[in-house]
Amino acid sequence: MPAPLRFDLVDLRLFLHVIDTGSITAGAKLSHLALASASARIRGMEDALGVPLLERLRGGVKPTKAGLAVAHHARLVLQQIERMHGEIADYAGGLAGKVRLLSNTAAITDYLPQALANFLNAHPAIDVELEERPSHLIVSQLLAQVADLGIVADSADISSLESRPFRRDQLVLVVPRSAGFGRQRQISFALALAHDFVGLDEDSALHQHLALQAERLGLRMRTRIRLRSFEAVCRMVEAGVGVAVVPAVAAESHANAGKLRMLTLTDAWADRQLLICARRFEQLSVPALKLVEALCAPAPSPTGKKPKR
């Protein structure tokens, strides 16, 4: 009879942090462990199982097939523990726990700040770990049980997930009012690509989405400068540096004294529904279900007005 495995929750969390970051050093830091202690724990897991769990590379580590299997079961164990804590806390008259939420750029910038602020103030014992990802990557990470919830655009393939409506989101092209677009009110992305662009950082979900759409057209975006916020992008467009694709909500919020115009993008992917997704909603912890309930509640437009063209 094989000896029982003696992994504790610290081992499992450490291993997942190492897998997610691709680095034992980074995983140790996230786990609040010394590097030597983290390395010893990983070696102990490998010795107990009798197989290598990580492939050591020059730039970091990646999981072996056995490592992927361990990561899958570790996520299940930790999710069940989190769910247990949530349910017990709920029975005790309060909620406690952490929810990991992945989101695309539009939701994380324009729709989540106020909604999450309201939720966190209403549930002081629940923490939310929020990270930005492109929609297609959010889907794959939800399937891999890397996160509890994701907010994606409906252009992503979510056939393997469950989803609920979150917000309607329209992407528009913002241009300087002084630019030579005349009375033009709409434009295709292909024609917009003839102009210089102002964009977000390369690691932003929106940039990756737009780069993918340009690639599908056999074209590329000429981006003159990259910035970290929609407000900065709109200010740079107003100054005549280039054009930009941003959510209509952001464009209207940052319009200034009529210096900015919005053109409707005629591409189908530009008018989209944002969805809250999970592998199975019924399998979520109580804190995660409470977050879904809060985010799905109807919310007014941030401006209460229709975008001006």
Image: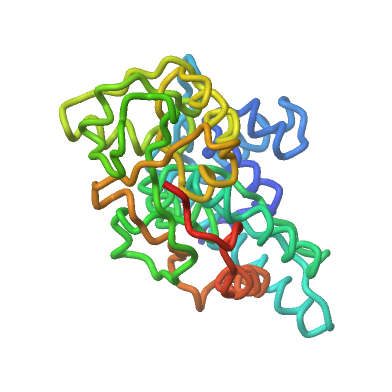
Residue 288 placement (x, y as % from top left): 62, 68
Residue furthest to the left in view is 218
Residue 196 placement (x, y as % from top left): 35, 19
**Can residue 252 be seen in this snapshot?**
yes
Residue 130 placement (x, y as % from top left): 62, 49
Q: In the figure, is residue 209 to the left or right of 257?
A: left
Residue furthest to the front in view is 183
The mark tally for this picture is: 0
Which residue is located at x 27 percent, y 26 percent?
193
> Is 5 drawn above or below residue 50 in the view shown?
below
Q: Quadrant of residue 284?
A: bottom right
Q: Nearer the viewer, residue 40 or 209?
A: 209
Q: Quadrant of residue 218?
A: top left
Q: How is the image coloured?
A: rainbow
Which residue is located at x 53 percent, y 43 percent?
132
Q: Nearer the viewer, residue 269 or 61?
A: 269
